[in-house]
Each structure stands twice: as structure tokens, then as C-alpha cells.
Amino acid sequence: MRAILGDIYDARRAQNLGWLATYLPADFCHVIHIPVDLHPLGGTRRGKKEAIERLRLIAEQFDFVVFDTSGLLIDRNRAAVEVPIHYHRQTGAPFESTKANFWTLEDGWPVKRTEYHDIARVQAFVAAHAGAHPA
């Protein structure tokens, strides 16, 4: 499981979504707990295709400067990690925060990822850069 999730995070850092997609089942579920009225990339995406499309849109908007998943904790059917992030927006605006990722695993494979973000930081970033993101 550690190798699978490690590869997924390595693919994410490299923004290689084809590689990342090889680890996800067709019915993968990806939840980002950011209200869609705050940012349209929040909410739930059901299915690998929808999840990968959202990750592609995020990759188009941000370069990853720091995306540290070294604190990954794995249990039999779940995994979790607090991820310090520093993204650099394509427009030049930086975003620093910490998010929490929770994985649901079946037979050692990821079937769902739920992300929690610091909503106050997201709100401040969106307000400071209103109109600067494509969506």
C-alpha cells in the first residue's frame, strides 16, 4: 500500500496524470471539501475520468513548489497524511497551506480520497486573486 500511494503522490508531484490514473479504479471517488461557490474545483467527483479531469485543471493552474507527503500513515483499509503545500499559481501568486488527505483502501488499492483544506486560507487566496483563475 505504501508503494502504491507513494507512486500516486510521486505522479501528482510530477503532474503525470497518466501515471497516476493507472492506480485508480474506474469508480474512484475524489472529494475536495471546498464549497463549489468558493471555487468550482471543490466538491465530489465520481469516477476516475472525472477525478483525473479535475486534477488536470488544478495542474494547469498551479505549479507545485512544496507537496510533502512524508508523514503518510497507513492502516489496513485506510491511509492519511497531512500535506504542507506551497503552490505557485501560473499567474505568479503563491498559495501556502496544509491540507489533510484521507484515503479509503480496498484490497490495498485506493478507491476514495477525501481532502480537507484550510478554508480561511482558501477564501483569502480567492479573494486576493479574484478573476485570476480560469474555471
Image (cartoon, helix red, strand yellow):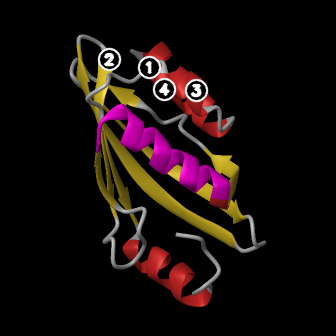
Mark 2 vs mark 1: in front: 1
Q: CA distance from mark 4 to mark 3?
A: 5 Å
Q: Which residue is mark 4?
A: 21
Question: Is 19 drawn above or below residue 90 in the view shown?
Answer: above
Question: Is 128 drawn above or below residue 101 in the view shown?
Answer: below
Which three-letter amino acid code belongs to the residue tagged 3?
Gly
Residue 80, position as x, y percentages in the image = 34, 37
Q: CA distance from mark 1 to mark 4?
A: 5 Å
Magenta-colored span: 46-60
Mark on residue 23? 1
Mark on residue 18? 3
First in sequence, mark 1 or 3: give its number. 3
Which three-letter amino acid code belongs to the residue tagged 2?
Trp
Mark on residue 109? 2
Residue at 37% across / 30% down in the picture? 73
First in sequence, mark 2 or 1: give its number. 1
Q: Judge left or right: residue 26 versus residue 70.
A: left
* Residue 13 quadrant: top right
- Assess disc 2: are there few (<14), some (14-19) or many (≥20) residues with their C-alpha within 10 Å of its C-alpha: some
Q: Are marks 2 and 1 in contact (CB under 8 Å)?
A: yes
